[in-house]
Image (cartoon, grey):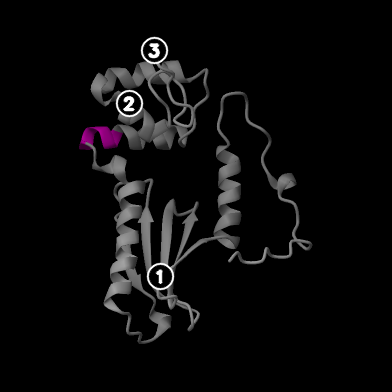
Amino acid sequence: MRAALPDTTDLMPIGPLMPADPVRGRRWADHRRTLGAVAWKHAAMVFRHPDGDYAITAMYSVPDDAWYLELDHVAGQRTLVIAIVPDEDPAREPTVCLNPNAGHADVPYEVMRWFMHEVDEEIRSSRAWMRLRPELVEIIYRLRQEHMGVIDDDDFPQVLADVRTAVPEEDLPAVLEAALGRNPDGTTMEHPQLPGL
């Protein structure tokens, strides 16, 4: 059964708030930051536990560069546990904290296992590049900071040449994917390499 759509008649269009279109070849980094801030405030993904009494709310915080996963008690409408999974800075470790305002709560073991499994999956997917060799992690981190995960098509060949001087050829695809979302031929990960190229 689908939930009813919310009434949107009183919502303001966000188009006028968006930054100007970037030059050809750039991704929508500024738009993502704007939308991320809106999503942080107004939207979240909710996953219910099969028993229906608990749910996980997942949100991304652009200012924190981190995923927040909250274990919520549905009937009590309160957050019991919060996991924070940073996905940009390898020096920041994921953390789990109990909500001090939630009071005492007995959470079933299976529910806590379910929550921690979801946290583990988020850590695995968001921080996979951080498990590469330390020298590669350092290069990826520097590239992500320098280019904010976005690179113009015209700038890619020079960046590729610079990366090739610092990274062994066999590691090049992993570094480019993690740092810039690109394949070695310059195509984006959303547009995979064509066979024979």
Image disc number at residue 159: none
Quadrant (top left, top right, bottom left, bottom right) of the C terminus: top left
Magenta part of the chain: 133-138
Label 1 sits on what residue type? His
Q: Earlier in the sequence, mark 2 or mark 1?
A: 1
Task: Give how far across and how far down residue 133 sits, in percent.
Answer: 20, 36
Dot 2 alpha-carbon crowd within 10 angstroms: few under 14, some 14 to 19, many 20 or more = some
Q: Which residue is mark 3?
A: 196
Q: Earlier in the sequence, mark 1 or mark 3?
A: 1
Residue 126 or residue 164, whichever sits in front: 126
Quadrant of the rendered image containing residue 165:
top left
Compared with 135, 193 (above or below) is above
Labels 2, 1: front one: 1
Main secondary-structure element of the magenta-colored stretch = helix
- Cα–Cα gap, marks 1 and 3: 46 Å
Q: Which residue is mark 1?
A: 49
Compared with 150, 126 (above or below) is below
**Relative to 167, 74 lies left or right:** right
- Cα–Cα gap, marks 3 and 2: 16 Å
Quadrant (top left, top right, bottom left, bottom right) of the N terminus: bottom right
Image disc number at residue 173: 2
Dot 1 alpha-carbon crowd within 10 angstroms: few under 14, some 14 to 19, many 20 or more = some
- Cα–Cα gap, marks 2 and 1: 37 Å
Task: Give how far across and how far down residue 174 sits, in percent.
Answer: 31, 30
Residue furthest to the front in view is 1
| Magenta stretch encompasses residue 97 | no
Q: Earlier in the sequence, mark 3 or mark 2?
A: 2
Label 2 sits on what residue type? Pro
Question: Helix, strand or loop at disc 2?
Answer: helix
